[in-house]
Image (cartoon, rainbow, N blue to C red):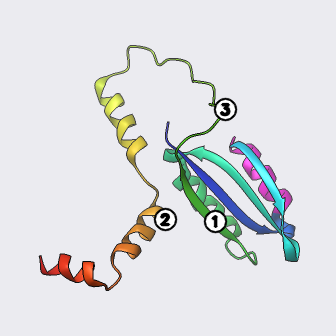
Amino acid sequence: MARRKVEIFIHKQGKDDLAGFLERNEVEGSWWTALDGGMYKAAFIYEAEKTEDLIDRLEKKYAEMPGFRIILSPVEAVIPRAPEEESVPEEETEEKAQEKKVLLLRISRAELYDDIRDFSEMNRNFIIMVVL
């Protein structure tokens, strides 16, 4: 299962509300760090295919809060391993299996925007690709 590490920087006035939000959304572990200036950092691991919706809701809820920021990183491995989910019944159709596979490969909109911005900077490689 593909996962993402999400780090959220939030002012102390939103800390308790964010903690409740994360608990309601059943994130995989959460770690809190107190920072300077009344800021906190919450870090947690979340399923990749559900990350975009979660980030959209967080941004909508906390975007106006001073110092709010979300950092999203792909997770290669987690040790100890998370317990495996129960096996899926064999009745699963090929169409559902294909849809599930596509969701696992999908990246969030925020990741896509950052990738596009990185690759569209005017540099030698960009000019060569445009000419080609």
Q: 23 and 80: which one is in front?
A: 80
Q: 32 and 125: which one is in front?
A: 125
User: Mark 3 — residue?
Assistant: 80
In this image, 65 relative to 5: left or right?
right
User: Is 61 drawn above or below residue 81 in the view shown?
Assistant: below
**Numbered disc in front, either 3 or 1:** 3
Q: Are marks 2 and 1 in contact (CB under 8 Å)?
A: yes
Query: What is the x, y in percent for residue 31?
Result: 78, 50
Q: Amino acid at mark 2?
A: Ala
User: In the rendered structure, which disc, 3 or 1, sits on the residue that comes first in sequence?
Assistant: 1
Q: Amino acid at mark 1?
A: Ile
**Distance (Cα) linking label 3 and label 1:** 25 Å
**Numbered disc in front, either 2 or 3:** 3
User: Is 2 drawn above or below residue 81 in the view shown?
Assistant: below
User: Mark 1 — residue?
Assistant: 70
User: Is 118 drawn above or below residue 103 in the view shown?
Assistant: below
User: Mark 2 — residue?
Assistant: 110
**Residue 94 lies in quadrant:** top left
Residue 13 painted magenta: no
| Residue at (41, 43) in percent of width and height | 103
Q: Are marks 2 and 3 in contact (CB under 8 Å)?
A: no
Label 2: which secondary element: helix
| Main secondary-structure element of the magenta-colored stretch | helix
Region in magenta: 15-27
In this image, 10 relative to 12: left or right?
left
